[in-house]
Image (cartoon, rainbow, N blue to C red):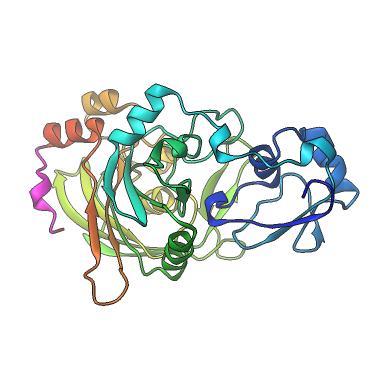
């Protein structure tokens, strides 16, 4: 394969990686300078078109890879050893496992995929979750680095295809719990605000932009409140935009507790003691997933326990998990 042109499809496991990150994963001996030259001369293409090294890929696209000589041997999954500490951590995070899927309770602070200055991430730990399978588990969706909770992995190529379709068709019901600063004007409702990325690299955020933004819709429901200082919201995204829940909560003038990126939208502040304790730990948790199953089987419902910092906040605010009708 390394002697000729390869036409390689972008798998669901590779999510929406940038082209340079894709090459780093699959052809690690091709350095960035060489990749940029290959792109500049049109030898590397995506779906037949010229692209730059920072081009954002999508599952199903075809990458043209020219002859690369000794650098053209694809890296094997087994060649990515997982540190014992990380392997133990990710195995302990398993909430559910069958022949097709694994559901993890992702810790807050763990990136799902690698990027600039991000060497430790869930994608790099997936070999620790083979559990004897010939297939390496595949990512089929993502959570923000600072968001904790339920994340699904596919254990086979067929399962990856099915799960990706479920997420793309929005047939996978997702419920998040968030502690927000202040109190929404209405206790329940729908936020429909198109979002666009603004700001320079490394400091980018999502803002409401009906002209350039992508459609983003979130349903929300107030579960409980601590006066007007902090509110516990149940969030159900209908779309899956970057930072959607964080940006939408900020647009309600109730940014998520611990969200330093979007807190500037707030006109109120919670109890200073609690705010100091939470710091920059985001109080957003992927609480529940309802996964449709084939045939007449009942949907699979997975609930992820709260992370420690949100458990502490719940105790301080007098919230009980049983208050949510989930």
Of 64 and 228, nearer the camera is: 64
> Which of the 4 image quadrants contains residue 28?
top right
Q: Position of residue 42 (x, y in %)?
A: 88, 53
At a point 48% along the width and 45% down the height, the residue shown is: 136
Left or right position of 6 against 317: right
Q: Is residue 301 on the magenta stretch? A: no
Q: Is residue 194 above or below residue 40?
A: below
Furthest toward the right, the residue is 41
Picture coordinates of residue 305, whole percent (x, y): 21, 42
Residue at the location (60% across, 40% down)? 76
Residue 103 drawn at (x, y percent): 32, 49
Rendered image quadrant of residue 276: top left
* Residue 193 shows in the view: no
Please tell me which residue lies in front, 229 or 161: 161
Q: Is residue 141 shown left or right of residue 88? A: right
**Looking at the figure, which quarter contains the C terminus?**
bottom left
Outermost residue toward the bottom? 296
For the image, the number of numbered tags is 0
Q: Residue at x 59, y 27 (%)?
A: 117
- Residue 311 appears in the rendering: yes
Does 13 appear above or below 27?
Answer: below
Q: Which residues are magenta?
A: 318-325
Q: Residue at x 45, y 56 (%)?
A: 156
């Amino acid at each position: 394969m390394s002697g000729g042109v390869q036409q390689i499809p972008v798998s669901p496991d590779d999510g929406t990686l940038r082209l340079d990150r894709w090459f780093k994963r699959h052809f690690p001996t091709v350095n960035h300078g060489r990749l940029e030259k290959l792109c500049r001369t049109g030898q590397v293409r995506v779906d037949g078109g010229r692209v730059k090294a920072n081009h954002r890929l999508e599952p199903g696209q075809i990458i043209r890879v020219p002859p690369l000589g000794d650098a053209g041997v694809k890296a094997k999954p087994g060649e990515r050893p997982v540190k014992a500490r990380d392997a133990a951590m990710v195995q302990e995070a398993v909430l559910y496992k069958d022949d097709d899927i694994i559901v993890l309770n992702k810790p807050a602070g763990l990136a799902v995929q690698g990027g600039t200055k991000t060497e430790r991430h869930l994608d790099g730990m997936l070999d620790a979750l083979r559990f004897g399978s010939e297939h390496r588990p595949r990512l089929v969706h993502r959570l923000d680095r600072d968001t904790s909770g339920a994340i699904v992995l596919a254990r086979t190529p067929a399962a990856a295809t099915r799960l990706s379709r479920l997420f793309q068709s929005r047939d996978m019901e997702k419920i998040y719990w968030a502690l927000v600063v202040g109190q929404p004007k209405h206790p329940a409702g729908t936020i429909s605000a198109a979002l666009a990325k603004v700001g320079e690299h490394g400091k980018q955020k999502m803002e409401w932009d009906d002209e350039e933004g992508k459609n983003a819709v979130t349903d929300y429901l107030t579960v409980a409140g601590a006066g007007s200082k902090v509110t516990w919201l149940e969030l159900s995204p209908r779309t899956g935009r970057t930072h959607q829940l964080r940006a939408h909560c900020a647009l309600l003038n109730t940014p998520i507790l611990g969200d330093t990126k979007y807190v500037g939208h707030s006109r109120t502040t919670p109890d200073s003691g609690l705010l100091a304790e939470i710091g920059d730990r985001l109080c957003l948790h992927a609480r529940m997933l309802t996964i449709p199953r084939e045939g007449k089987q009942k949907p699979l419902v997975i609930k992820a326990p709260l992370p420690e910092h949100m458990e502490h906040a719940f105790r301080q605010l007098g919230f009980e998990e049983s208050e949510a009708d989930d």
